[in-house]
Image: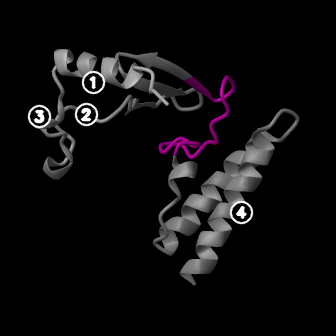
Amino acid sequence: MVRIARERVGALFVLAEAEGRPGGDLAQGHRYVRLARRIGTRYTVRIAPAYRERYCRSCSSLWVEGRTVRTRLRRGCRVRSCLVCGRIRRTPLQTGPAPGSIPRGLEVPSTAVVPAEEATEELAESEEPEEE
C-alpha cells in the first residue's frame, strides 16, 4: 500500500508541474497538490524533498514563480511569499560547511603544512634540468 501511495504522490506532482507551465490550468495543478498531500497523510508517506519546495504548506497551492510565489534572497535566507494566502517561508541558503561542522577525524593535521622556505627549496630542486 505504501509503495502504491508513494508512486501516486509522485505522479500527482508530475501532473501538477505540467499544469503549472504556461498554458496549463493552474487550478487543476492546485488540486493535484491537495490530492497528493491527502494521500501522503492517509498512508503516512513522506513527500520527497524535491517536491516539498514546490507547494505552499498552508494553502496547498502549487508554486509557480511569478504567478503564485515571490522569491527574494535576504541575509543568507531564501524568502518565499505565497501570493495566494500570504504565508512567508524562509529557508537558509547553504554556501558550504558551517564552521566547526567538520568531524574531528577528518581535520587536516597541522604538521601537513610546509613552511614557505622549504616549499620554495623543493620547487627549485625539482625544476633543475636533468643531465643525461
Residue 13 lies, in percent from the top left, at: 67, 55
Which type of secondary structure does the marked residue at label 4 adopt?
helix
Residue 85 lies, in percent from the top left, at: 53, 32
Q: Nearer the viewer, mark 2 or mark 4?
A: 2
Left or right of 117, for residue 53: right
Query: Label 3 crowding class (10 Å Cα cut-off): few <14, some 14-19, many 20+?
Result: few
Residue 21 lies, in percent from the top left, at: 80, 37
Per the model, the C-alpha gap separating discs 3 and 1 is 19 Å
Per the model, the C-alpha gap separating discs 4 and 3 is 52 Å
Per the model, the C-alpha gap separating discs 2 and 1 is 35 Å
Q: Earlier along the polypeptide chain: callout 3 or callout 1?
A: 3
Magenta segment, prevailing SS (helix, strand or loop)? loop
Circles 2 and 3 in contact, beta carbons < 8 Å: no
Q: Nearer the viewer, mark 4 or mark 3?
A: 3
Q: Residue beneath label 2, please?
A: 98
Left or right of 12, for residue 107: left
Q: Nearer the viewer, mark 4 or mark 1?
A: 1
Q: Earlier along the polypeptide chain: callout 2 or callout 3?
A: 2
Q: Which residues are magenta?
A: 53-70
Q: Residue beneath label 4, please?
A: 11
Left or right of 45, for residue 115: left
Query: Label 4 crowding class (10 Å Cα cut-off): few <14, some 14-19, many 20+?
Result: few
Which type of secondary structure does the marked residue at label 1 adopt?
helix
Q: Nearer the viewer, mark 2 or mark 1?
A: 1
Q: Quadrant of residue 9?
A: bottom right
